[in-house]
């Protein structure tokens, strides 16, 4: 979904520096421990099901008890992505359920021949049961940065993938699918739209009908190829309003500015939402703003400075100790409504979000009547003392 986070050794494997991602277009590659391709879902007896048509049917594995059904959907959502590979930082038992309305479980991956390929290592009955016991819906996030959906241009392969996603929900108790295809192009947008239509029908056939959402780029260039009908079929649209600056930029800039500002940032939260709500006329209450719990280091020592490299992604929990310490100075850009850190040696410019900038974005969501926010990722701001200041600020988006 998001996009990039600092995951230590994992991130080093995923990206060398930050140089392989285009502006506004990041999302994690998913769980690195992926099993061999398996297009069929496991059945309760350990065999494989037929991944068949997504009709109705009872959930048979990981189903919450009858006395604690999945909660009803709220009018405003705070959807937090929980990545399986952050389990050591934030195990299921420590997830702050009271702070969120939905948890997006990242990531189950599409197979190169259609279907899903890591279901047995992905499914987490304890996660689903804990979410439902706490009144939180949990959706299966499919894809992520680096996931290959190309096979789904073929109608037969796509039918396998749609059936597998519906079966994943029906069998294991997920409350919906969050589609994170990064990113459909002119050549694949038709297949993306077909998948949305087919998946919407499959999820509606399950009783009760399940949600279908999508994490989409904040860039009008990427959004422009997505048909209105497919986006309107979504229960909500998570706009990844971050990664507006990075190693692809001509100079250092803000990762997620609320408003346009100087520097190497290409776009802003406001511009992306204006495009979707005004130019494309989508219902504001379906649009969720993206809140990044991470930032970027740049080689420059000032906003709008060069060089950009080295460029590294850092979770907020890794940046918090720098603020006004160890030679770093915090500055707040009142125009962009975004903080940054500078020092005299390279890397000397860090773009990030703090409680103030998250609060400004939440005020914007209320002002514009938006549907809430998505968070990448839930463990990103968990400090050593157990505090989660960005998540506290994000409550204003609910």
Image: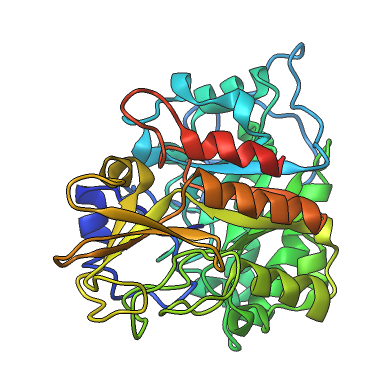
Is 261 displayed left or right of 17 in the figure? Answer: right
Is 249 displayed left or right of 108 in the figure? Answer: left
Q: Quadrant of residue 23?
A: bottom left
Q: Tell me which residue sits at (53%, 25%) in the image.
A: 96
Q: Tell me which residue sits at (33%, 31%) in the image.
A: 89
Q: Quadrant of residue 341?
A: bottom left
What scheme was used to colour the molecule? rainbow
Residue nearest the observer in this picture, 322 or 63: 322
Q: Tell me which residue sits at (26%, 77%) in the image.
A: 308
Q: Is residue 370 visible?
A: no
Q: Tell me which residue sits at (59%, 71%) in the image.
A: 218
Residue nearest the observer in this picture, 276 or 197: 276
Q: Residue furthest top?
A: 67
Give above or below for 49 relative to 164: above
Give above or below for 112 relative to 319: below
Q: Is residue 1 visible?
A: yes
Residue 144 position in % (x across, y down) = 47, 59
Residue 301 position in % (x across, y down) = 24, 70
Q: Residue furthest left?
A: 345
Residue nearest the observer in this picture, 332 or 362: 332
Is 224 displayed left or right of 117 in the figure? Answer: right
Residue 231 position in % (x across, y down) = 76, 68
Residue 109 position in % (x across, y down) = 46, 55
Task: Classify the position of the C terminus by image quarter.
Answer: top right
Give above or below for 85 relative to 108: above
Q: Quadrant of residue 223?
A: bottom right
Count of marks, rendered view: 0
């Amino acid at each position: 979904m998001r996009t990039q986070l600092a995951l230590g050794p994992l991130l080093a494997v995923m990206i060398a520096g930050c140089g392989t991602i285009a502006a506004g277009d990041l999302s994690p590659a998913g769980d690195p421990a992926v099993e061999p391709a398996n297009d069929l879902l496991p059945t309760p007896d350990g065999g494989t099901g037929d991944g068949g048509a997504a009709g109705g049917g009872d959930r048979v594995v990981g189903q919450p008890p009858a006395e604690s059904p999945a909660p009803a959907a709220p009018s405003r959502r705070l959807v937090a992505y929980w990545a399986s590979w952050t389990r050591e930082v934030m195990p299921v038992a420590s997830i702050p359920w009271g702070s969120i309305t939905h948890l997006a479980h990242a990531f189950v991956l599409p197979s190169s021949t259609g279907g899903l390929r890591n279901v047995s290592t992905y499914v987490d009955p304890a996660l689903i049961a804990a979410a439902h016991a706490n009144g939180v819906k949990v959706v299966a996030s499919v894809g992520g940065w680096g996931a290959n959906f190309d096979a789904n241009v073929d109608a037969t392969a796509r039918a396998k993938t749609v059936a597998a996603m519906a079966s994943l929900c029906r069998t294991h108790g997920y409350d919906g699918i969050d589609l994170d295809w990064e990113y459909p192009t002119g050549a694949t947008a038709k297949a993306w739209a077909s998948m949305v239509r087919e998946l919407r029908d499959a999820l509606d056939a399950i009783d009760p009908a399940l949600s279908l959402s999508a994490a989409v780029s904040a860039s009008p260039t990427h959004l422009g190829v997505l048909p209105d009908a497919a986006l309107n079929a979504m229960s909500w649209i998570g706009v990844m309003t971050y990664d507006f600056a990075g190693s692809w930029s001509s100079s250092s800039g803000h990762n997620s500015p609320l408003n346009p500002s100087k520097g190497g940032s290409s776009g802003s939260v406001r511009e992306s939402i204006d495009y979707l709500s005004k130019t494309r006329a989508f219902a504001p209450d379906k649009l969720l703003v993206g809140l990044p719990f991470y930032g970027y280091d740049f080689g420059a020592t000032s906003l709008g400075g060069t060089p950009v490299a080295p460029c590294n992604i850092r979770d907020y929990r890794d940046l918090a100790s720098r603020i006004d310490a160890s030679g770093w100075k915090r500055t707040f850009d009142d125009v962009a409504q975004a903080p940054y850190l500078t020092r005299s040696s390279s890397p000397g410019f860090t773009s990030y979000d703090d409680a103030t900038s998250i609060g400004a974005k939440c005020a914007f969501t209320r002002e514009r009547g938006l549907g809430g926010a998505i968070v990448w990722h839930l463990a990103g701001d968990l400090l050593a003392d157990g505090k989660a200041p960005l998540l506290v600020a994000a409550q204003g988006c609910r």
